[in-house]
Amino acid sequence: LMLPGLDGFGVCRQIRPWFKGPVLMLTAKQSDIDQVLGLELGADDYVVKPVEPRVLVARINALLRRTQIISKAEQQELQFNRLLLKQRSREAWYDNERVELTSYEFDLLWMLAKHAGQTVKREAIHQQIIGREYDGLDRTVDVRISHLRRKLGDNAETPFRIKTVWGKGYLFVADAWQ
């Protein structure tokens, strides 16, 4: 947890909105407050050093087993009233008509829909969809959001399906797909 520049808590806080894999914190910080904080920030396990190598390997294997079970059970389709997203075939359907989306647009819509009702930070979208850090000036995500809104019949002036949360990111409104 004691890293130069950014501690493990900060790393966990930054990656959790977009990284769904297991996170294990291995640290010398042993207070119960640190352990609770690490787990509340999204770590799946918290191991205090020193730790026997066999114990650490067993804990990592247990995390990976749980992750595989969750991955297999993870939804391949998302439906919000008249909007249907199919991950496997990368298709979007609205009102029983296929919506033609680019690969980036589908990934963006899937990410927002997976977090329906939650604000997804622009930084997380940049990192996961665009593949680079957000520099504060890049409007790539904004342009792609506007394309998505147009293709999905959302009002450009006052969007109600994919809302902008100023200074934060975007919000997919689950019950707006009537």
Image: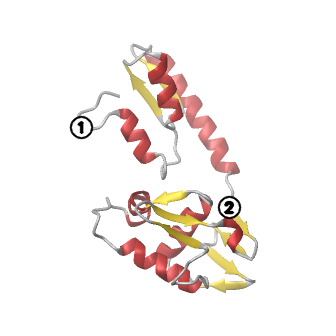
User: What residue is at 55 percent from the left and 30 percent from the top?
Assistant: 61
- Answer whether labels 1 and 2 touch (C-beta < 8 Å): no
Residue 149 lies, in percent from the top left, at 54, 80
Rendered image quadrant of residue 26: top left
Q: Position of residue 66 (x, y in %)?
A: 63, 36
- Residue 137 falls in image quadrant: bottom left
Q: Mark 1 vs mark 2: which is more N-terminal? A: 1
Residue 38 drawn above or below residue 48: below
Q: Residues within 10 Å of mark 1 (few under 14, many from 20)?
A: few
Residue at image mark 2: 76
Look at label 2 and name its amino acid. Answer: Gln
Indicate left or right for 77 with 5 as reference. right
Q: How many marks?
A: 2
In the rendered image, the quadrant that contains the C terminus is bottom right
In this rendering, would 3 be left or right of 15?
Answer: left
Label 1: which secondary element? loop
Residue at screen point 68% across, 72% down? 176
- Image coords of residue 153 (percent x, y): 61, 85
On the image, the x and y values in percent for residue 116 come to 62, 60
What is the crowding at mark 2: few (fewer than 14 residues within 10 Å), some, or many (at least 20)?
Answer: few
Q: Relative to 134, does residue 159 appear above or below in the rendering?
A: below
Q: Residue 5 got which mark?
A: 1
Q: Is residue 175 above or below residue 52?
A: below
Which residue does the image show at 66% across and 71% down from the upper left?
A: 85
Identify the mark at residue 49; answer none if there is no mark.
Answer: none
